[in-house]
Amino acid sequence: MNATLEMSQGKTMKRVSVLTLAILVTALTGCESAVPAVCQIGSSFTGGYAVHLTRTGTPQAGCDTPAGTPADIGDLWVFDPYAGAQGTLIIGYSANIGGPLTGVPDPPDSASPLYAKAYFTSLYPDSEDNCTIDSMNMSNGADSYAITSMVWLNTAKYLGAEIKGNVSVTRGGCTADYTVQALWPPVLCTANADCDPFAQPVGSGINPDFDQGCNLDPWAQDVGVIVNDLFHGDDPAPGLGICFLNQAYPSLGGFTQ
């Protein structure tokens, strides 16, 4: 394990240890609350969601570049619930659109276009354990995400830990359509063992029902840079990736080494 990863895990150990215990107890017993759990989101306290955007079409001329609309984009999104006129208002923020998350005001200025704002379409998950947000947008004036059909895997067992959806990305003067998949919490890794929910003395904090592992693709290393900056304020050593889902949503089947 490299020093950057070891330091990251040490600093976040207290944050994820209680989360790990709660998730493992639910997963191992197979028990969920007799009362249906309302739609939930992963806490921003543990760093938000690791995000993978995958382009679905052919890019505009000159746009298949890292600063434009490449085939894959990595990002970190955070969401927080606030009391709104129609119930719980979900406010979201993107590191790519808004900048380092260490500078996010608390509470955020809800009038700023940097922040996506929306309500779940229902208080409770549907029959397939999904909660849906129809659309939410975030923009810094030059770059923007227009997110639609956002679905969150949601029961007392999954806690909104996985997201899928569609995003129209405008970046560097280019626009393209993407699918999005996201996993909470974001966990830095150099090998699959770092993603193990059952690791000792503390697990990764990722739900053990998810089929996930260490991803070292360039987009995942971009996420690793963002997450490391969030916790340490510097760039990580090369080769630091992020634990991420191995399959399309909902990517169930359990963790394997």
Image (cartoon, rainbow, N blue to C red):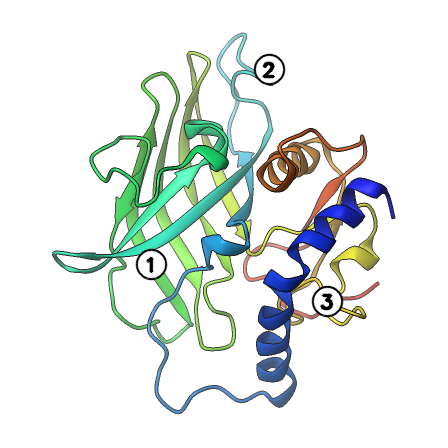
Residue drawn at (58%, 16%), measured in percent from left and top?
64
Of labels 1 and 3, earlier in sequence is: 1
Amino acid type shown at disc 1: Thr
Q: Are marks 1 and 2 in contact (CB under 8 Å)?
A: no
Which disc number belongs to residue 203? 3
The residue at the point 47 percent across, 43 percent down is: 77
Q: Position of residue 188 (x, y in %)?
A: 71, 47
* Observer able to see residue 84: yes
Q: Quadrant of residue 167?
A: top left
Q: From what the image shows, is residue 87 above or below residue 103?
A: below
Residues at discs 1 and 3 in contact (Cβ within 8 Å): no
Report if residue 206 is visible in the image.
no
Q: Which residue is mark 2?
A: 65
Residue tagged 1: 132
Q: Regarding mark 2 in the picture, which secondary structure is present there?
A: loop
Residue positioned most to the top: 62
Q: Relative to 103, is 13 on the left or the right?
A: right
Pick the quarter of the image with the C terminus: bottom right
38 relative to 52 in the view: left or right? left
The image quarter in which residue 98 lies: top left
Dots 2, 3 in contact, CB < 8 A: no
